[in-house]
Amino acid sequence: MEEFYVLDTCSFYSYCCKYLNLFTDKDISLDDNSLKMLHNAFNASEIKIIIPSVIMVEIFDHYFNDEEFINKFKYEVYYRLFNTDNECNKIAIIDIDTEVLENLFNCYTENVNVDLHDKLILATALKYKEQNTTLFTSDRRIKKIQRLNHLSINIKS
């Protein structure tokens, strides 16, 4: 059975820090075990990596102000990860579609201050809840929404 790993911004960032030497501040938020699982997943044919498109928006917004970084990101992420054969498109950037929008309604929680991009990441993960899916996140707010709304998704931090 194929597995799906959905990444949030912090887990994608942590992976890029540890294995691609992409970011200089090296603020890794995932534990070593989770990072090893992700690294193995990028090389395993039975695991599909799901990256919500909002992650790319966040990275562009925060880091695309330096030409050297842009070139490094283009080579390390775009060419090496996304634009390779990568075993029949095992890495997918998922757009916001009607199913993600429907799931977004389930991510609303009163009195929990959560950014929209975090809700979109969780809503994207919920799109794959019928499959064997794990959301990689260290964000307590995403975990709180998942717990308070009884959303059926595995979380690994």
Image (spheres, rainbow, N blue to C red):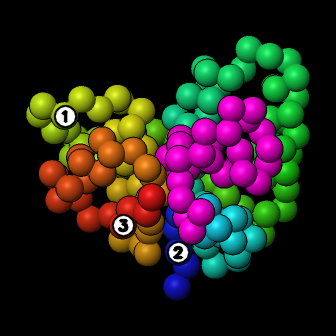
Find residue 64 and report its image quarter. top right
Residue at the disc numbered 3: 154
- Taking depth in this image into account, of 5 and 127 the one nearest to the observer is 5
**Rendered location of residue 10, percent (x, y):** 53, 43
| Mark 1 / mark 2, whichever is N-terminal | 2
Q: Nearer the viewer, mark 3 or mark 2?
A: 3
Residue carrying label 1 = 112
| Residue 129 belongs to magenta span | no
Using the image, determine if residue 17 lies above or below residue 128: above
Q: Which mark is residue 128?
A: none
Q: Is residue 15 magenta?
A: yes
- Mark 1 and mark 3 residues within 8 Å of each other at the beta carbon: no
Mark 1: which secondary structure? loop
Q: Position of residue 107 (x, y in %)?
A: 24, 43
Residue bearing mark 2: 3
Magenta-highlighted residues: 6-34
Disc 1 marks a residue whose amino acid type is: Val
Of residues 125 and 29, the one drawn nearer to the viewer in this rendering = 29
Q: CA distance from mark 1 to mark 3?
A: 20 Å
Q: Position of residue 21 (x, y in %)?
A: 80, 44
